[in-house]
Image (tube, helix red, strand yellow):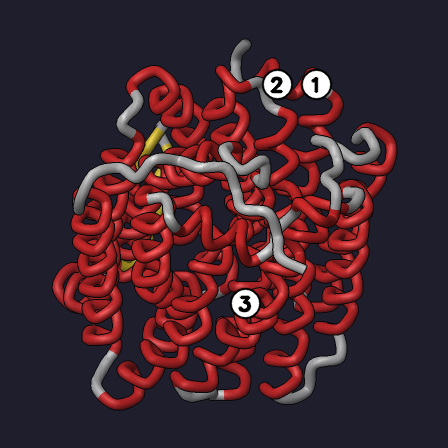
Amino acid sequence: MSNLALFRDREFLALAGTAFARSQAYSTILIALALYADLFNTSGVVEGLFGTGFALVQLLIVLPLGRAVDTGNAKRYLLAGLALNVVVFFGFLLVAIPAHIVLIRIVQGLAASVLWVTGSAVVGEISPQDARGRWLGTYNQVGAFSSLAGDVLGGYLLHAYGFSFTYVVLAGITAAAFVLVLGFLRSNPGGQKDPEDATHLETIRALMAQRMVRSLVFFRVAFSVGKMAVIIFLPIYARKEFGINAFAIGGILAGGKLTKSLLQGYVGDVTDRVGARYRFVVAGALLYAVGVALIPMAGPVNAAVGDVSIRAFGRGLTVSGAFAAMFVSFGILGVADSLRLPASMALFVEEGEAFDSVASSMSLRSISWKFGQVAGPVAIGWVRDVVSWLWAFWVASALVLVATLIFLLSHRKGPIPARESAPEPSD
């Protein structure tokens, strides 16, 4: 079955709809955050709180959420997450001070966590075992394409029509995804576990006893600090340092999202055939470090070359050197994520299956990211305030390299422990 043929499956279509709505909203609001940062003239630490507020609630909710998905009706959680996202959009209409942004980002973090953990777990559960990489890769591909649409369409809407109309459009897209899930997705997708067998601390400990899970968790904690510097601060850097408008910021981000949307499904299929998925994780992380280090080169490039003329298909476009440099850098990051993400997700699903707790494994994957996501934005924002943008991005790049080294060392250390059944929960 080809990647496009998956959309003939009504359940996959419904799940893809949740990924589309979630990623569209996430990308558009990231551009909006850059506009708010410029509007309120915020410091790096405050801008970091825009990311920390989003992640903090996810850190607190992700493990209980994994247990709830394991034992309850995942369809209801998807519907609740979509409804909460609509509430978020109307909350942004009321923003008057930076503190409001942080508070609404907390609610957005809750909604996004529900959609991400539940959607990923359901895709992993209902996909055929011999095509899991294709299902997960294509599911992520939808998210990447939607994220690209959020950059381009969301950036245009923010530039042309402002905040209010943009948030109404996002609410409409989310409502459409709600209808798809309500109409097409089975009740209790992937089955329902007995509460006595699901997502106890014993299950988490059993997962962490596996060398692959442990190495992936340590990797994601360190890697997330570096990646969050890009996610939060690249749009703000473009806006504050070079005065780039919302539509053009969306164009910068679209470079990485385009490569990500085109390659991720294909790479997922390659990992199914080639195996040795950890090598894809390492290759993607190393390439990501390179891309992050190149971002602050936008300043020197802009000073050296000024405007850059681009010609294609008989048409010409003139952009600033800063725009061109950041576009290329983010494109490299898109290729890097395409190498890393399908392999990482498939590894977590495989380990979770051994304990009949895929949602728990995906929750562990998510929570490992949140530790770095909570601390990373504020830490990198502080570096930007105290030193410079250059050092902020270079510190982020160095952290990605450290994460890769941690992954290699923890993955290679010692023999693979024998996998055992998850222990029975204690009373």
Q: Is residue 26 above or below residue 44?
A: above
Camera-side residue of 307 and 37: 37
Q: Which residue type does callout 3 highlight?
A: Leu
Gap in angstroms between the C-alphas marked 1 and 3: 33 Å
Closer to the eye: label 2 or 3: 3
112 relative to 286, above or below: below
Give the side of residue 323 with respect to residue 87, left or right: left
Q: Residue at x 73, y 65 (%)?
A: 89
Q: Pointers 1 and 2 in contact (CB under 8 A)?
A: yes
Nearest the camera: 392 or 162?
392
Residue 82 relative to residue 252: left or right = right
Residue type (three-letter) at the residue carrying disc 2: Leu
User: Tag 1's secondary structure?
Assistant: loop
* Disc nearest the viewer among 1 and 3: 3
The residue shown at (79%, 41%) is: 75
Expressed as whole percent of the image width and height from the top left, the position of residue 125 reads 62, 30
Element type at mark 3: helix
Q: Are marks 1 and 3 in contact (CB under 8 Å)?
A: no
Mark 2 surroundings: few (<14), some (14-19) or many (≥20) residues within 10 A: some
Q: Which residue is mark 3?
A: 59
Q: Residues within 10 Å of mark 1 (few under 14, many from 20)?
A: few
Helix, strand or loop at mark 2: helix
Given the current orientation, which residue lies at the most extreme front position? 427
Q: Residue under label 2, please give it.
A: 6
What amino acid type is highlighted by mark number 1? Asp
Q: Quadrant of the C terminus?
A: bottom right
Q: Residue 338 in the image: state x and y as whole percent.
A: 36, 37
Of the numbered discs 1 and 3, the one sitting upstream in the chain is 1
Q: Which residue in the protein does label 1 denote?
A: 9
Residue 234 on image: x %, y %:
37, 65
